[in-house]
């Protein structure tokens, strides 16, 4: 690669970085202003940066936002979903990759096909179906942690199975055959041999799915409602949006609080994302 082409690629990369960082920087800048200043000059620098502390305290202490309960709900839904999704998807992908039958290929293609279906197409039938199942079975699919986690398992499982399926195909089959000769059961083989070898791709899926679940607004708003007892952080941010008045200083400060944990997680775990992608491609 010649120097001119490399400089051009670096220039394009810098432009993309600026475009990606602009929304985040605007949130930080406007979190240190009052609503009037944001409306008059949304891209201007704040006069007093200490105002961001005042706005954050006002958001945390606001009873409508209920930061601690919303934070717990987001943490609980994200962590439980990721744990269940990782184990179930890993087992499903392993079985589908090792069973060379028409049915296994057909089931795998169904998972792949499910990835291209937009959520907006199925959201209304999903809510109607969950409501009917709740009446018949008696399980609280709507307005409960159970229903949201169950929905995320369905929508997040396809991508995880697709990625892990390709990774498992790169694991030598001789390892499993040797374990079977030594008397290893299927369950022990998976948890002692296969699952630890999936670590690079598992970390990648956990981070990508974790950011999606944490930041998602549409599915929790449909499953939990905008005024329900259970609120995730993206839903709680809307508590500062009224019919006639929008408290932009509190909205942006609440958005900053909501995005801060996942940004810290991404900064800490970014090396695992890159290593997982590299090792997955090598496999």
Image (cartoon, helix red, strand yellow):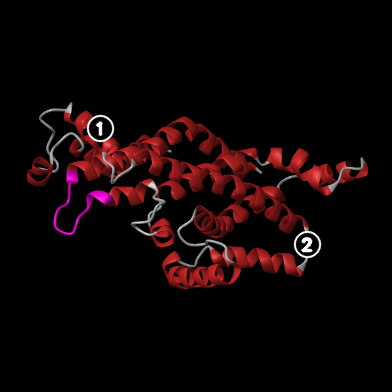
Query: Where does label 2 land, which residue?
Result: 100
Mark number, residue 197: none
Q: Quadrant of the N terminus?
A: top left
Q: Quadrant of the C terminus?
A: top right
Q: Earlier in the sequence, mark 1 or mark 2?
A: 1
The vertical placement of 150 against 182, above or below, is below
Residue stretch rendered in magenta on the structure: 239-248
Mark toward the viewer: 1 or 2:
1
The vertical placement of 184 against 154, above or below, is above
Residue 259 found in image quarter: top left
Look at 18% across and 39% down and name the residue there. 30
* x and y, in percent, of residue 277 in the image: 55, 42
Q: Is residue 18 visible?
A: no
Query: Where does label 1 land, which residue?
Result: 57
* x and y, in percent, of residue 70 in the image: 39, 44
Left or right: where does residue 121 sit relative to residue 278? left
Q: Is residue 61 visible?
A: yes
* x and y, in percent, of residue 109 in the image: 63, 66
């Amino acid at each position: 690669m010649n120097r001119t082409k490399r400089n051009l690629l670096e220039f394009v990369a810098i432009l993309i970085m600026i475009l990606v960082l602009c929304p985040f920087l605007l949130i930080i800048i406007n979190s240190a202003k009052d609503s009037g200043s944001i409306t008059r000059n949304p891209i201007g620098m704040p006069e007093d940066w200490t105002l961001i502390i005042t706005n954050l305290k006002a958001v945390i202490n606001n009873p409508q936002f209920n930061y601690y309960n919303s934070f717990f709900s987001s943490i609980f839904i994200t962590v439980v979903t990721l744990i269940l999704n990782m184990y179930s998807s890993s087992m499903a992908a392993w079985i589908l990759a090792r069973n060379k039958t028409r049915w296994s290929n057909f089931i795998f293609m169904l998972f792949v096909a499910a990835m291209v279906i937009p959520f907006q197409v199925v959201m209304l039938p999903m809510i109607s179906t969950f409501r009917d199942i709740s009446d018949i079975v008696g399980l609280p699919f709507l307005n409960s942690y159970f229903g949201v986690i169950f929905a995320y398992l369905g929508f997040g499982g396809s991508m995880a199975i697709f990625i892990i399926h390709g990774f498992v195909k790169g694991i030598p089959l001789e390892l499993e055959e040797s374990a079977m000769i030594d008397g290893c059961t299927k369950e022990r083989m998976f948890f002692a041999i296969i699952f630890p070898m999936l670590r690079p791709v598992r970390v990648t899926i956990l981070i990508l799915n974790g950011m999606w679940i944490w930041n998602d607004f549409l599915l929790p708003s449909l499953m939990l409602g905008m005024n329900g007892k259970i609120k995730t952080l993206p839903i709680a941010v809307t508590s500062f949006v009224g019919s006639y008045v929008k408290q932009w200083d509190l909205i942006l400060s609440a958005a900053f609080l909501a995005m801060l944990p996942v940004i810290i997680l991404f900064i800490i775990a970014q090396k695992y994302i890159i290593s997982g992608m590299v090792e997955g491609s090598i496999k």
